[in-house]
Image: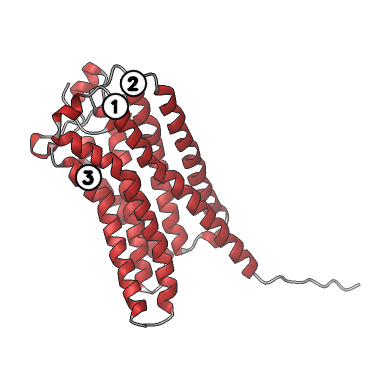
Amino acid sequence: MEYSWSGRQLPYSTEMGGIEPLFYVAFTVLLVPGVVGNLSVLLMTCCYGRLRTPAGIYVVNVAVADLLFCVFGVLLDPVSVLLRRWPFGETLCYACSFSEHLGVFVHGYTLVVAAARVVAGRPPKLRSCHLSNAGVWFLGTVVCLPQMLFVDARALTVHGQCIVKWPATVKTPEPFISFVALAASPFLLVSALYAWLRASLWLGRGRAFVRRASIVRVFWLMTLLQLLCRMPLHVTRCLLGVCAAMRATSHITVVVLATRAIAAAVVCFTAAFFFDLSAKQLSRRVRQVPSVAVNYGS
């Protein structure tokens, strides 16, 4: 079988040392909080108009992207590796790798757009936020489309395995390009924006920069978390691309599953953080509403 790059696209190990149940438990632990947490953020924003602020719109976009990643990157993809076949049909095979990468892309670059809006200083209108989010989804669709176009239909039909078969010219650099596009670039862009705000504070440009810096610092920490969680997976994929001996080891599926679990952990941390942030923001806005005493005459 032609070798490709992602977790389910490795030569399927016939022996995993009997630790398959541990991975089922691990991905379940990641899936349930990720889905529940992100759905809670969406429901809170839909039910409470006070949360439909510019920042809230960006948080919702990240939550939708994380839900997409939960379905394809935490549920379908790892299960197919553990079963050593693709049991979910042709349509989901074409959608899986594309949707997983799209979710990661939208997660990272929504944080970039949100940080850039804060640095600009003027609170954006809600319509502008929606347009920005739509632009991120469109750009992500274009960037991640090759993940769908290069699915190996023959491997799916004959071997029952869902793999992306890259052309020889991009097969080796693809893991490096993926790492830069999905993890490194969002972190570097938000880091540059945060550094500019810190420099402005150091130059004494005003107290308004203090609040902006505190907000962008949150986005910077989220992109740092995404970078750290996804780095083991990308490093493993890069090593697999240049080291044939590593691809031949019988334990490589275990290694890739473990790194995928670490990469998926970012959705749980993000969901928990944004749920807590939304709850605090809602509580603060409720306290700011003045109470009205109604005096009924006797």
Q: Is tag 2's residue or tag 3's residue first in the polypeptide sequence?
A: 2
Tag 1: amino acid = Thr
**Separation of disc 1 and disc 3 at Cα?**
20 Å
Nearest the eye: 136 or 79: 79
Q: Residue at x 35, y 78 (%)?
A: 202
Q: Residue furthest left?
A: 169
Which label sits in the foreground, 2 or 3?
Answer: 2
Mark 2: give few (<14), some (14-19) or many (20+) Cα within 10 Å: some
Q: Is residue 296 left or right of residue 53?
A: right
Assess whether mark 1 and mark 2 are in contact (beta carbons under 8 angstroms): yes
Q: Is residue 56 visible?
A: yes
Against 126, is 31 above or below?
above
Q: Which residue is mark 3?
A: 178
Residue 253's disc is 1
Q: Is tag 1's residue or tag 3's residue first in the polypeptide sequence?
A: 3
Q: Residue at x 27, y 19 (%)?
A: 160
Q: Is residue 27 left or right of residue 80?
A: right
Residue 16's disc is 2
Against 207, is 39 above or below?
above
Quadrant in the picture for the N terminus: top left
Indicate the quadrant where residue 48 lies: bottom right
